[in-house]
């Protein structure tokens, strides 16, 4: 989709410092991808009451068993 937008120059300049992209188009595409990924992730708080954890689950023992391999 082609569109023209006005961007905050200082915000764009700062965003370039955090990426290795070289164009504004790439920067906007990266920002949109990250935005969508962040919103697709389920908020852990939404799982409250929907997930049950076994009372006999011992993650420390499992780690020790993995270290022995």
Image: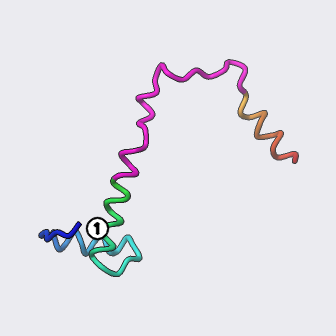
Q: Residue at x 66, y 20 (%)?
A: 54
Q: Give 61 or 9, whichever is nearer the viewer.
A: 9
From the image, tell me which residue sits under label 1: 28
* Callout 1 crowding tier (Cα within 10 Å): few <14, some 14–19, many ≥20: some
Q: Residue at x 46, y 27 (%)?
A: 47
Q: Where is residue 49? Give x, y as percent.
A: 48, 19
| Above or below: residue 38 compared with residue 64 | below
Q: Where is residue 57? Give x, y as percent.
A: 71, 25
User: Magenta part of the protein: which range?
Assistant: 36-57
Q: Where is residue 23? Give x, y as percent.
A: 30, 79
Which residue is the extreme one toward the front?
Answer: 1
Q: Residue at x 38, y 49 (%)?
A: 38
Can residue 34 be found in the magenta stretch?
no
Indicate the secondary structure of the residue bearing disc 1: helix
> Quadrant of residue 51 in the image?
top right
- The quadrant of the image that shows the N terminus is bottom left
| Above or below: residue 35 compared with residue 29 | above
| Above or below: residue 37 compared with residue 4 | above
Report the colour scheme: rainbow
> Quadrant of residue 42 in the image?
top left
Can residue 53 be found in the magenta stretch?
yes
Which residue is the extreme one toward the right?
Answer: 68
Q: Is residue 44 left or right of residue 31?
A: right
Q: Is residue 48 left or right of residue 53?
A: left
Q: Residue at x 12, y 70 (%)?
A: 6
Q: Give 36 or 49, whichever is nearer the viewer.
A: 36
Which residue is the extreme one toward the bottom?
Answer: 22
Q: How many marks?
A: 1
């Amino acid at each position: 989709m082609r569109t023209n937008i006005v961007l905050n120059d200082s915000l764009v300049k700062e965003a370039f410092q955090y990426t290795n992209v070289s164009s504004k188009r790439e920067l906007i595409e990266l920002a949109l991808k990250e935005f969508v990924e962040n919103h697709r992730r389920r908020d852990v708080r939404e799982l409250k009451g929907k997930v049950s954890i076994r009372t006999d689950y011992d993650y420390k023992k499992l780690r020790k068993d993995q270290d022995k391999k």
